[in-house]
Amino acid sequence: MLVVKDLIKKYGELTAVDNLSLEINRGEFFGLLGPNGAGKTTTIRMINTLTPRTSGLITIDGKSMDRNLTEVKIKIGVVPQHNNLEGEMTAWENLELHGRIYGMPKKARRERIEELLEFTDLTERAADLARTLSGGMKRKLMIARALMHKPELLLLDEPTVGLDAAVRRKMWDLLKNLSSSGLTVLLTTHYIEEAEILCHRVGLMNRGRLIELDTPKNLIEKVGKVVVEYFDNEGTKGEFFETREDALAYAAGRQGNVKIRSSNLEDIFIKLTNRRVED
Amino acid sequence: MGFSSILWQEAIFFKRKFWSITTGSIIAPVLYLIAFGWGLGGGMRIDGTDYINFVIPGIVALTTMTVSFSTIANSINISRMYEKTFEEFMVAPLNMWVYAAGKITAGSFRGLYSGFLILFLAFLFQTGIKINPYFLFILILNCLTFSAIGFIIGIIIKSHADMGKFTSFIITPMAFLCGTFFPLEKMPFILKNIIWLLPLTHTSLGLRSSGEDFYSMLIHPGILLLYFIVASAAGVRLCKKAE
């Protein structure tokens, strides 16, 4: 569905995205996970054409962005990190405007708006100005807007950033429903749990580079399913083990405060980069 | 479809803010009319006509200029830098010409609306101002030109403060010097020739052009049209580079 090859973005001396290559299959929920400044948003902005590439190729359904820009743009739905709704327009009008821009006929627009407002649980707020909606509702409306023209690829840039834990979980339910509908999704996040719960495959990004790419399960198995966390003079450290028994045996031999838990994507990230994802 | 979408969006904003737009458009011109038209210029005659009939086209010219300009420049500037709604259009399969045409037309409508409000007042007070198709043609060209210039400024400025600077150094001097409140002939020779090159001068002259020869009547729309075409083309070009 989406093929990114040798993608580079430079801002002067700074390389924001460094030789990134990846392929996302149709119907896949793919996550780019990394700390702030890893190059996730720059990558998504190059895919949605807002940021020009320094070099590299992007194709969607075999169509190059350089030669078929209009055709490619129709296939993409974009949910940016920041709120970019028209605050002085109602929820309905925001969707209506998007449908009009994408040339949808009147009847199709109306039906799609009703369907999406119901999907995002916003039907009762349809006539309210977008600026009066809560943070979570705004995000849901932005997702509805991005889906309005029935894109084949949905780009979600940190869709739950700034939302409280309860709203974030509701948003995950909504995104899971999207995934089950067969839509291809590229999500960027720095929330470990979000990537683990939602994504079929995850690409770990650090300083513009893709350092690891696999399913969350395989990534975790690569370092060991169980981690023994302990504290010494240099701070918190972890040792990885294949089985809980091995971990217990190791923990028994250590003095002081020791914690045994299942490994997660954060552990892999730290092991590979010596940085935390949520830095 | 994209063009009509932008006009539809602007129509929604217009409907929602009708009273603030209407009062906002009329306060400054009414003050100019009172202060310059009936106050300072009361009983005065210029070019064989009452000063009030001389100054009304000038006030129409400068008001339609500022409204067309600021409507679009502010709207694009805010949508680019603060609300980020500009991105919604950038990621859409929308040609930048269509986007520019929609925004410039919308800005022109707002300018024309403010112009018609002043003319309505002028008729209400029976000033005797005469309007013909040429007057309306010049008015439309003025709105399109300054809307297109507003489009460029909205695209290129880096902050809202820059907008204030442009208004202070370019728009406000034009509003007072381009034959709006007094005839161009009263200006020093060099300054007069510089001001003659500015678009608002040709709006002021064009709106008062009854009695001018055919050649002069071609010059005014010609220069406005030239500004409009150059500003629109530059706006689209800049728009593609903006993000």
Image (spheres, coloured by chain):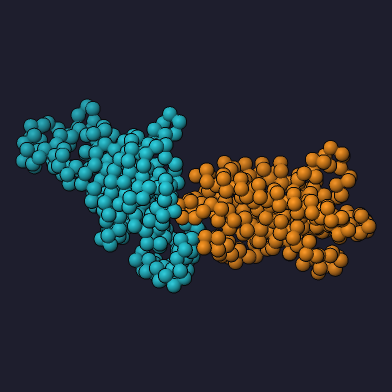
Decide if residue B185 is in sight here. yes
Q: Is residue A197 above or below residue B16?
A: above
Q: Residue at x 65, y 53 (%)?
A: B147
Decide if residue A123 is in sight here. no
Q: Is residue A15 above or below residue A244?
A: above
Quadrant in which residue B139 is drawn: bottom right
Q: Is residue B32 above or below residue A262?
A: below
Q: How many marks?
A: 0
The percent position of residue B179, horizontal first and vertical second, equals 82, 49
- Between residues A230 and B6, which one lies in front from this camera angle? B6
Q: Residue at x 71, y 59 (%)?
A: B140
Identify the chain drawn in orange. B
- In the rendered structure, the answer to whether residue A107 lies left or right of residue A154 reads right
- In the rendered structure, the answer to whether residue B210 lies left or right of residue B73 reads right
- In the rendered structure, the answer to whether residue A42 lies left or right of residue A251 reads right
| Most distant residue in the top direction | A233
Identify the chain drawn in cyan. A
The percent position of residue A25, horizontal first and vertical second, equals 26, 51
Quadrant in which residue B101 is drawn: bottom right
Q: Residue at x 47, y 63 (%)?
A: A103
The percent position of residue B24, horizontal first and vertical second, equals 68, 59
Q: Residue at x 61, y 63 (%)?
A: B14
The percent position of residue A4, horizontal first and vertical second, equals 33, 43
- Between residues A94 and A106, which one lies in front from this camera angle? A106
Query: Image quadrant for the C terminus of chain A?
Result: top left
